[in-house]
Amino acid sequence: MKNFKQIAFGLLVGAMAIGFSAFTTAKSAKFAGAYYYNQAAQQPWGVTVADQTSSHYTMISGQTYSCEQSSNICSYDLVGGKFVQNSKGDNSLVP
Amino acid sequence: MESLILKRERVRLSELAKERIIIGIRFICLFLFLYTAYAKIVDHARFYKGLTRVHLISAFAGFISYAVPVIEIIVSILLLIPQTAKAGLYAFTGIMSAFTLYIISAMLWEQNLPCHCGAAIEKLSWGQHIWFNLAFIFIAIIALRLVHSKYIFKKQ
C-alpha cells in the first residue's frame, strides 16, 4: 500500500512535469524558438513560400532575432515541421 | 570530544525524515528528466539539428537524439518504482555527470554552442548550466548516502 501510494504520487509528479514541459515548449516555439539560417538559397525578406529543404538550413542562436529587411539574409522558425520566415528582427545580420 | 559526539547526535535524521528526503529527491530528479525528455521528443527535429552542429558528437547525432530521451524516460521509471529507486539514483547521477562532462568538453572545443537541453532549461547560459547540473548531482548523491545509511541501519 505504501509503495502504491509512492508510485501514484510519482505518476502525479511525472504528469506535472510533462504538462509543464508542454506549456514551456509551446511558449518558446511561439516567441523565442529556433532560428535557422538558409545557406543554400538565401531568400529575400517577405517570401510567401520558404525553402523547405532542411539540409539548406543551419541553426543559429535562439536568443537573437536576426532579420534584415533590406538584405537577402533572414532567419526562420520551424513551426509544425515547416520553415517559416521569422517576422521579428532587430536589423542585425545573422552571425 | 564529548561535545562533538553530542553535536553529531543532534544532526542525526530520523528514519522517517530520511525516507521523506529520499522520496523528495527522487521525484525532483524524475521531474527534471521527464520535463526535458518530453521537450526533446516533441521538438525532435530541432534537438537533432542542434546535435549535428556539435563536432564532437555530430557523427552520432541521429543515435544520440533518440537515445537521450529514451534513457531519460527509463531512468524516470527506475526512480518512480521504490524497488528500483537506488539503481535509478545511481543512473541519474551517472547520466548527469556525463552531461556535465559533455558541456565542459564542448565549452573547451566548440565555438558556437547550441543548447538543446529542452524547454526552459535552454535559457540558462553554459556556466549556469554546469552549476545547475552539479546541484542535481549533489542532491542525488545526498539521496544515495541516505539510502546507504538506511541500509546499514537496517542491517544492524
Image (cartoon, coloured by chain):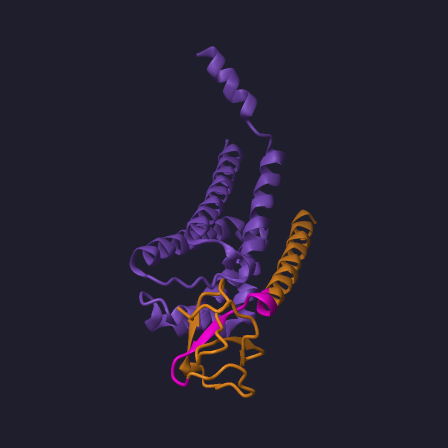
Chain colours: A orange, B purple
**For the point 46% across and 84% down, which residue is it?**
A43
Question: Vertically, is B106 above or below B21?
Answer: below
Q: Is residue A32 magenta?
A: yes
Horizontally, residue B121 falls left or right of residue A41, namely right
Residue found at the very far top of the displayed protein: B2
Q: Position of residue B7 (x, y in %)?
A: 51, 18
Query: What residue occupies the far left of the structure in this picture?
Result: B109
**Residue nearer the viewer, B98 or A20:** A20
Residue B53 x, y percent position in the rendering: 37, 70
Residue nearest the viewer, comparing A94 with B28: A94
Q: Is residue B15 left or right of residue B72?
A: right
- The tally of labels here is 0
Identify the residue shown where x is 67% and y is 52%.
A9
Is residue B33 a member of the stretch shown in magenta? no
Q: Residue furthest front?
A: A70
Left or right: residue B78 compared with residue B59: right
Figure quadrant of the C terminus of chain A: bottom left
Task: Name which quarter of the figure residue B68 lies in.
Answer: bottom left
B61 or A62: nearer the viewer: A62
Image coordinates of residue B61 in percent, x first then y, are: 39, 71
Query: What is the quadrant of residue B105 in the picture?
Result: bottom left
- Which one is nearer the viewer's eye here, A3 or B2? B2
Q: Position of residue B122 (x, y in %)?
A: 50, 59
Magenta-highlighted residues: A28-41
